[in-house]
Image: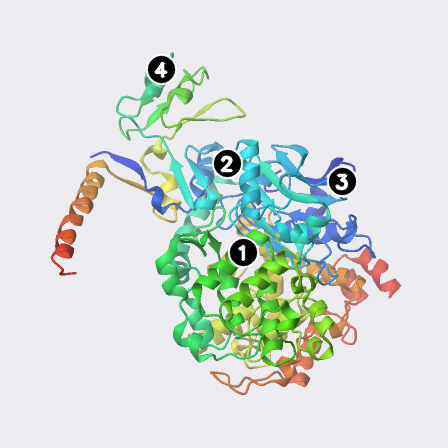
C-alpha cells in the first residue's frame, strides 16, 4: 500500500528544521527558503502550520503545465518536475490550491516535494511527530478508530460511569 | 565562504550611513559569535564613553554554525557597555532572528550613534533601511512585533525590539524576539532605547553554505535521533523546567525570597507549577532547528498567552514568596511586554520585600503599597512602576542600589548584587563551584557552566558523577557541592567549553545538557560546516583568548580582584533549614579558591589582572600594551 506524508499541525513547534534539512538534502546548503516544505507561523498565538504538497488525485500543477514537465512518480506517489522539460513559467506554482508548490527566488526553479524517493528527511528529523510518513489506509483507519472511540466514552460519561 | 556569511555590518544611526567589513580577518583568532563580538567591542568602544551615550556600540553576533542544520543553531550573542555594571555586557537570545541575519549575508551588526527620532532598522535581503518608529514608540513588545509585521505586510519577518522599559532607559531593560525569547540580562534594551532604536527587523532568503553537506546531514540526523532518546529531552520537551523546580527546591539550590531562606515548607508542599502547565500549556516550543522544546507556550483565559522558560519559574514564585501561579503568569507576561529583565525585576521585588519584612522600609517608601511577602499588588505594581518609571519604580529602574541609597545605609548593605547585577537565583552557600563561577564570572551569573550543572546532577548518582568529574575536571571533588577542592580548575575548563558554544552561535544549554558535554562534537560540526580541520585544543585556545580579552576589557573599565565577590549574606548567614542546613561560605577558603583560579589562569593574584606573559602567549600583545601600560 502506498505511503504518504501526513502533517499534524497541532504537534508542530515551529522549529523550521524540516525546511532547513530539506534544503540541505536537496540543495547542499542551509536555507529554509529553499525547502520543499514551509512552516507558516503565528508566533504570538503559538500556532504553526507546515505546508507541503498534498499529492492531489487530480493535481492542478500537472494539469496546467504546458510542457508536461510535472508528472507523478508512481513508485512514491510524489508529484515531481522534470527540470529538462520545465520552462519556468510558474503556472504550477500559482495553480496550486494550497500554495504548496514553491519557487527558488534566485533561480526561478520550481521546488516540489519528491518525498526523498520514499524516505523523507523531514520526517526523520521532525522532533514533535508533526510530520509522519504512513500508509494512507492505515492512517485513515487510525483516524476512524480515534473518532469512533469518542462515542463509548461519551456514553459512559452520560451514564455517570466516568 | 562556508559557515560564515562573510560580512560585518556597521550602522551609524546618527548619520544614517552604513558600511561593511569582511569577517574573515577575525576568524583565526576569535572564530565568531561571542568571540568576534568581544574583539569588536574591545576595538570599537572608546574608554570613558557612558553606556547610554550614542558612542556605546551595540553589537549583535552570530557564529559560523548559526542557521545551519545543526541542532540548536539559532543563537545570537549581544554585547555593549552595560548600563548596569559599566563593564562589558553580555546577553544571548535564541528564536529565529539570528539565522535570518545570516541568510541576509551578515555575521555581525554593530550599531552606533543615535537617531534624531525613534526609528527601526530593516534588513531586507542584503539591503539596509532606517525607517520611522514614531508610531511604534510607547507600544509594548507584542504590539510592536505585530505592528511591524502588518506594516511590512509580512507575518514571517523576524524582529527584535524593545518595549516601554527600553524606551524609558530602565537600566535592566531587555531585547525581545518575535517568540518572546529575550536577550534578558545586562540592560541591552536600555542601550537600544538610548539610540532611539525601537527594533531591528530582518527578512532574507539566502543560505549558509556548507563545506561537506552530506556529512552534515548524516551527522545532524544522528545527533537529533540520539538526543530524542535522552531522558532530559523527554522532560524538557514536555514540561520545560516546570517540574524540575520541585527537585531544585529539594536540593536547596533555589533560594526563597531575597536569598533569605532555602527551605520554605509551603513551596515545597504547594508549588503549583506542573499543575499550571498541565492546565494551561498549549504546547512546548523551542528555537530555530532545535529538537528540544524547553519553553512553555501558556495560554490563560483573561490573562493572556505567551512563552516562558526557566527564570520566571523561580524568580516569580519562591523568589518573591509567591504561590499563586496566576500572579506568576501575569508577572511573566508583564515583564515580557514591558521589555524588562525578569531576573533583575524579581530580585528588585525580593529586595523590597526583605526591606519591608525587616522594618527598614514602610508602605510610605513604596507609594503606599505595603511590600508584604508574596503580596499580589506589591508584585504587579512594582513591575508596572519599574517599566513605566513611575514613583518608586523610577528609582528601582536605575538599579537596586539607587533605590536602597535613597533609603539609607541600612538598606544599601542589604543589596545582594554581583558586579552590578542580581545574581542568578541559585543558592551558593552550599554550591561552591557555582559560587566561584559566579564571583569570577564576566557578569553577575555563572550558569550554565558545566561544573555548576554537575553539582546539581551529583545528587542523582554521587559516585557516577564524581567519576565524570574526575575524567572531565581532574578531581572527584569538583562534583561535590560543599567541597572547595578542584573547583578552580573545573570552573576554568567549563568557562572554555561554554565559550565554544557561544563562539559557534549554538545553544549552550542544549550543548551542556545532552551529547555535547565535551566539545568534540561541537568541533566536529564546526569542521564539517566550515571545511576547516581544527583540533579540539585549538577551539579551547580561542576560548582562553576570549576569556582573557573579556577580562582585559573589564580591567580597562577598572575591574579588580575585589570585584570578584559575592554578597556578604553568603558568608555571614548560614542556611537555617533543609538539606544543607548550617552551610555558609568560608571567606578564607573562598579566597583560596580564587587564588587557585587566578594562578591556573596566569593572572596576578593580588589584582586579578591577566599577566603580560599570559596575554602575549595568547597573541594579545596589543591589549597588554594598551591596558597594562596605563595601569
Work out whether B575 lies above or below B42: below
Between the C-alphas of marks 3 and 2, the distance is: 28 Å
Q: In this image, B382 relative to B129: left or right?
A: left
Do callouts 1 and 3 mark residues in contact (Cβ within 8 Å)? no
Quarter of the picture containing the C terminus of chain A is: bottom left
**Mark 4 chain:** A
Residue B125, visible in the rendered structure = yes
Between the C-alphas of marks 2 and 1, the distance is: 23 Å
Q: What's the colour scheme? A: rainbow
Between the C-alphas of marks 3 and 4, the distance is: 53 Å
Instruction: From the top left corner, tell me how far across and down residue B68 is, in percent.
Output: 52, 43
Residue B392 is tagged as none
The residue where tag 1 is placed is: B334
Callout in the foreground (2, 1): 1
**Mark 2 chain:** B
The residue where tag 2 is placed is: B155
Could you say whether the residue bearing mark 1 is in a helix, strand or loop? helix
B349 and B472: which one is in front?
Answer: B349
Could you say whether the residue bearing mark 3 is in a helix, strand or loop? loop
Q: Earlier in the sequence, mark 3 or mark 2?
A: 3
Do callouts 3 and 2 mark residues in contact (Cβ within 8 Å)? no
Q: Earlier in the sequence, mark 1 or mark 3?
A: 3
Quarter of the picture containing the N terminus of chain A is: top left
Instruction: From the top left corner, tell me how far across and down residue B541 is, in percent.
Output: 66, 59
Which residue is painted at 55% across and 54% down in the image? B336
**Mark 1 chain:** B
The residue where tag 4 is placed is: A64
Residue B535, visible in the rendered structure = no
The answer to whether dots 1 and 3 both sit on one chain is yes
Crowding at label 4, few (<14), some or many (≥20) Cα neighbours within 10 Å? some
Which residue is painted at 39% across and 49% down in the image? A127
Instruction: From the top left corner, tell me how far across and down residue B551 is, in percent.
Output: 73, 63
Amino acid at each position: 500500500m502506498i505511503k504518504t506524508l501526513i502533517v499534524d499541525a497541532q504537534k508542530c513547534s515551529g522549529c523550521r528544521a524540516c525546511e532547513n534539512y530539506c534544503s540541505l538534502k536537496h540543495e547542499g546548503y542551509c536555507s529554509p527558503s529553499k525547502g520543499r516544505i514551509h512552516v507558516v507561523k503565528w508566533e504570538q498565538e503559538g500556532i504553526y502550520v507546515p505546508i507541503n504538497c498534498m499529492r492531489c488525485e487530480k493535481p492542478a500543477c500537472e494539469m496546467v503545465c504546458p510542457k508536461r514537465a510535472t508528472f507523478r512518480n508512481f513508485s512514491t506517489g510524489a508529484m515531481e518536475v522534470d527540470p529538462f522539460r520545465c520552462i519556468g513559467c510558474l503556472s504550477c506554482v500559482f495553480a496550486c490550491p494550497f500554495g504548496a508548490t514553491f519557487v527558488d527566488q534566485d533561480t526561478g526553479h520550481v521546488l516540489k516535494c519528491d518525498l526523498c524517493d520514499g524516505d523523507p528527511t523531514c520526517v526523520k528529523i521532525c522532533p514533535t511527530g508533526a510530520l509522519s510518513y504512513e500508509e494512507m489506509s492505515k492512517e485513515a483507519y487510525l483516524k476512524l478508530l480515534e473518532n469512533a472511540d469518542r462515542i463509548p466514552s461519551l456514553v459512559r460519561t452520560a451514564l455517570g460511569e466516568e | 565562504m562556508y559557515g560564515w556569511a562573510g560580512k560585518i555590518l556597521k550602522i551609524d544611526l546618527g548619520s544614517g550611513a552604513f558600511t561593511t567589513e569582511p569577517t574573515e580577518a577575525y576568524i583565526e583568532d576569535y572564530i565568531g559569535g561571542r568571540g568576534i563580538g568581544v574583539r569588536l567591542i574591545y576595538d570599537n568602544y572608546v574608554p570613558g564613553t557612558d553606556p547610554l551615550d550614542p558612542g556605546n556600540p551595540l553589537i549583535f553576533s552570530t557564529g559560523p554554525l548559526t542557521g545551519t542544520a545543526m541542532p540548536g543553531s539559532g543563537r545570537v550573542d549581544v554585547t555593549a557597555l552595560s548600563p548596569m555594571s559599566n563593564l562589558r555586557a553580555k546577553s544571548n537570545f535564541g528564536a529565529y532572528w539570528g539565522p535570518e541575519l545570516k541568510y541576509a549575508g551578515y555575521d555581525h551588526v554593530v550599531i552606533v550613534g543615535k537617531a534624531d527620532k525613534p526609528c527601526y532598522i530593516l534588513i531586507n535581503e542584503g539591503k539596509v533601511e532606517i525607517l520611522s518608529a514614531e508610531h511604534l514608540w510607547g507600544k509594548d513588545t507584542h504590539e510592536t512585533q505585530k505592528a511591524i509585521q502588518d506594516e511590512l505586510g509580512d507575518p514571517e519577518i523576524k524582529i527584535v525590539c524593545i518595549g516601554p522599559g527600553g524606551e524609558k532607559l530602565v537600566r535592566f531593560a531587555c531585547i525581545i524576539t518575535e517568540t518572546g525569547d529575550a536577550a534578558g540580562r545586562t540592560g541591552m534594551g536600555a542601550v537600544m532605547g538610548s539610540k532611539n532604536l525601537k527594533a531591528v527587523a530582518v527578512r532574507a532568503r539566502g543560505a549558509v553554505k556548507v563545506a561537506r553537506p552530506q556529512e552534515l546531514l548524516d551527522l545532524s540526523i544522528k545527533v537529533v535521533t540520539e538526543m530524542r532518546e535522552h531522558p532530559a529531552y523527554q522532560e524538557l520537551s514536555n514540561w520545560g523546567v516546570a517540574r524540575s523546580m520541585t527537585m531544585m527546591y529539594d536540593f536547596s539550590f533555589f533560594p526563597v525570597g531575597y536569598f533569605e531562606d532555602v527551605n520554605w515548607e509551603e513551596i515545597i508542599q504547594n508549588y503549583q507549577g506542573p499543575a499550571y502547565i498541565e492546565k494551561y500549556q498549549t504546547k512546548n516550543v523551542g528555537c530555530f532547528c532545535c529538537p528540544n522544546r524547553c519553553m512553555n507556550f501558556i495560554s490563560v483565559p483573561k490573562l493572556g498567552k505567551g512563552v516562558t522558560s526557566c527564570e520566571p519559574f523561580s524568580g516569580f514564585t519562591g523568589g518573591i514568596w509567591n504561590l499563586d501561579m496566576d500572579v506568576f503568569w501575569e508577572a511573566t507576561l508583564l515583564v515580557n511586554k514591558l521589555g524588562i529583565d525578569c531576573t533583575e525585576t524579581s530580585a528588585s521585588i525580593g529586595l523590597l520585600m526583605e526591606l519591608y519584612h525587616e522594618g527598614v522600609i514602610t508602605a510610605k517608601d513604596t507609594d503606599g503599597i505595603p511590600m508584604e511577602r508574596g503580596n499580589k499588588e506589591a508584585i504587579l505594581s512594582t513591575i508596572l512602576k519599574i517599566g513605566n518609571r513611575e514613583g518608586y519604580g523610577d528609582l528601582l529602574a536605575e538599579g537596586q542600589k539607587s533605590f536602597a541609597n535613597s533609603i539609607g545605609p541600612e538598606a544599601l548593605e542589604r543589596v545582594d548584587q554581583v558586579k552590578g547585577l542580581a545574581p542568578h537565583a541559585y543558592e551558593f552557600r552550599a554550591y561552591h563551584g557555582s559560587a566561584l563561577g559566579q564571583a569570577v564570572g564576566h557578569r553577575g551569573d555563572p550558569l550554565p557552566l558545566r561544573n555548576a550543572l554537575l553539582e546539581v546532577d551529583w545528587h542523582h548518582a554521587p559516585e557516577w558523577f564524581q567519576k565524570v568529574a574526575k575524567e572531565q575536571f581532574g578531581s572527584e571533588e569538583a562534583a561535590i557541592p560543599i567541597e572547595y577542592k578542584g573547583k578552580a580548575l573545573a570552573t576554568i575548563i567549563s568557562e572554555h567549553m561554554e565559550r565554544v558554544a557561544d563562539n559557534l552561535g549554538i545553544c549552550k544549554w542544549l550543548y551542556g545538557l545532552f551529547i555535547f558535554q565535551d566539545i568534540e562534537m561541537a568541533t566536529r560540526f564546526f569542521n564539517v560546516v566550515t571545511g576547516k580541520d581544527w583540533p579540539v585544543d585549538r577551539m579551547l585556545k580561542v576560548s582562553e583568548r576570549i576569556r582573557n580579552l573579556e577580562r582585559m576589557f573589564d580591567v580597562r573599565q577598572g575591574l579588580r580582584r575585589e570585584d570578584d565577590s559575592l554578597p556578604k549574606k553568603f558568608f555571614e548567614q548560614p542556611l537555617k533549614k533543609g538539606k544543607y542546613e548550617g552551610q555558609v561560605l568560608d571567606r578564607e577558603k573562598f579566597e583560596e579558591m580564587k587564588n587557585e583560579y587566578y594562578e591556573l589562569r596566569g593572572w596576578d593574584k593580588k589584582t586579578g589582572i591577566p599577566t603580560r606573559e599570559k596575554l602575549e602567549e595568547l597573541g594579545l600583545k596589543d591589549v597588554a600594551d594598551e591596558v597594562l601600560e596605563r595601569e
